[in-house]
């Protein structure tokens, strides 16, 4: 694995244990801007481009430190760069790219983004990010990091990978989940039917263990949880980040919830759990699904935010 020289990095707990290091909790920051660069649809009354996928721009910091993170890159670089330009965001300033998982709608633009940046860039992800991932119905389709997105090619373009199952406070206030503990039984159903190859080359179901998320600790508010597709389950993801960060309050949740293939019972139980977690702000996107999204809008009329490409939210 390529060594990456960037600071600060403070390792916290490993997935599934709920244990933390000697640090009581992740540091708090006092400002954050979350901008949607790629989503299935553009925001209303704009000239931005929609594209099936997800990419978020995160700017956070305090008096001591500032950081700029590109969370996923979507499937195509052209709409990403086009939208960023119209939104006044210079992705050339990025400090790190974080990949939520391997699927093409979150990663396929990576090689072209690296060509645009034309420099070395640290990329944080789970070690399983390069595992094969594909679907067989209605026909074979490769979902994984292959072709122009194979590791050797990306490293030639400047990618410097930090691949870990551990949770990390990558920059002050910014927590990478690592591998997410899957503790809620009801979140085991309704996932995308992906397959992979085992060590013997046999086809087997793909659990998408590389699914990861971010948690940002806002001073006096709590965690802002950022998901890619939440294949591990949105509730598992939130609870895991609360555990490894030591931050109990949830300020908000944004990103894909991957409930579009789920039955009504799972959606209902997700809403019940969300009510118990009491986020003050909720923005399901991308792969959440129309009916689950509408159900959440009805369940959280004062806290629901519809966010599409071009939308932004800030905390100061």
Image (cartoon, rainbow, N blue to C red):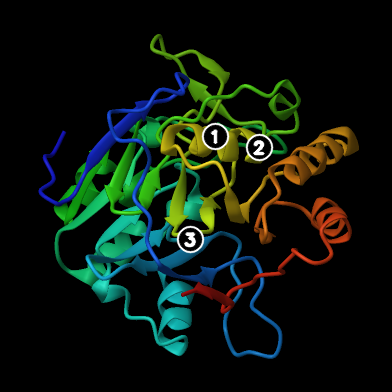
* Quarter where residue 125 is shown: top left
Locate residue 297, reporting x and y percent.
Answer: 83, 61
SS for callout 2: helix
* Quarter where residue 216 is shown: bottom left
Label 3 packing within 10 angstroms: few (<14), some (14-19), many (20+): many
Foreground label between 2 and 1: 2
The residue tagged 1 is 134
Residue 74 has which mark?
3
Q: Are marks 2 and 1 in contact (CB under 8 Å)?
A: no
* Quarter where residue 166 is shown: top left
Q: Height in image: 271 above or below 16?
A: below
In the image: residue 17, left or right of residue 127: right
First in sequence: mark 2 vs mark 1: 1
Residue 235 has which mark?
2
In the image: residue 204, left or right of residue 62: right
Locate residue 193, reporting x and y percent.
Answer: 66, 31
Foreground label between 2 and 3: 2
SS for callout 1: strand
In the image: residue 73, left or right of residue 157: right
Q: Height in image: 120 above or below 100?
A: below
Which residue is depicted at the point 71% across and 29% down? 187
């Amino acid at each position: 694995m390529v060594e990456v020289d960037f600071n600060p990095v403070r390792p916290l707990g490993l997935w599934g244990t709920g244990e933390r290091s000697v640090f009581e909790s992740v540091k708090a920051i006092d400002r954050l801007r979350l901008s949607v660069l790629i989503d299935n649809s553009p925001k209303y009354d704009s000239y931005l481009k929609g594209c099936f996928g997800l990419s978020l721009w995160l700017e956070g910091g305090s008096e001591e430190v500032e950081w700029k993170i590109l969370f996923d890159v979507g499937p195509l670089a052209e709409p990403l760069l086009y939208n960023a330009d119209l939104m006044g965001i210079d992705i050339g300033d990025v400090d790190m790219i974080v990949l939520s998982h391997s699927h093409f709608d979150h990663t396929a633009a990576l090689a072209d983004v690296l060509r645009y940046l034309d420099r070395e860039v640290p990329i944080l992800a789970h070690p399983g990010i390069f595992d094969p991932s594909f679907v067989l119905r209605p026909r074979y389709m490769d979902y994984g990091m292959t072709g122009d997105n194979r590791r050797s090619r990306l490293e030639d373009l400047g990618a410097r990978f930090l691949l870990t199952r551990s949770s990390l406070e990558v920059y002050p206030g910014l927590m990478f989940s690592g591998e997410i503990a899957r503790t809620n039984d009801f979140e085991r159903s309704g996932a995308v039917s992906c397959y992979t190859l085992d060590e013997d080359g046999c086809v087997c179901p793909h659990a998408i263990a590389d699914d990861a998320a971010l948690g940002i600790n806002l001073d006096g508010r709590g965690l802002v949880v950022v998901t890619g597709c939440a294949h591990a389950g949105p509730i598992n993801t939130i609870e895991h980040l609360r555990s490894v960060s030591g931050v109990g309050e949830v300020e908000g949740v944004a990103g894909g919830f991957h409930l579009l293939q789920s039955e009504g019972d799972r959606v209902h139980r997700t809403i019940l759990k969300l009510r118990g977690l009491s986020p003050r702000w909720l923005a399901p996107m991308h792969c959440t699904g129309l009916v689950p999204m509408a159900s959440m809008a009805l369940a959280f009329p004062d806290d629901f935010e519809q966010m599409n490409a071009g939308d932004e939210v800030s905390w100061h």
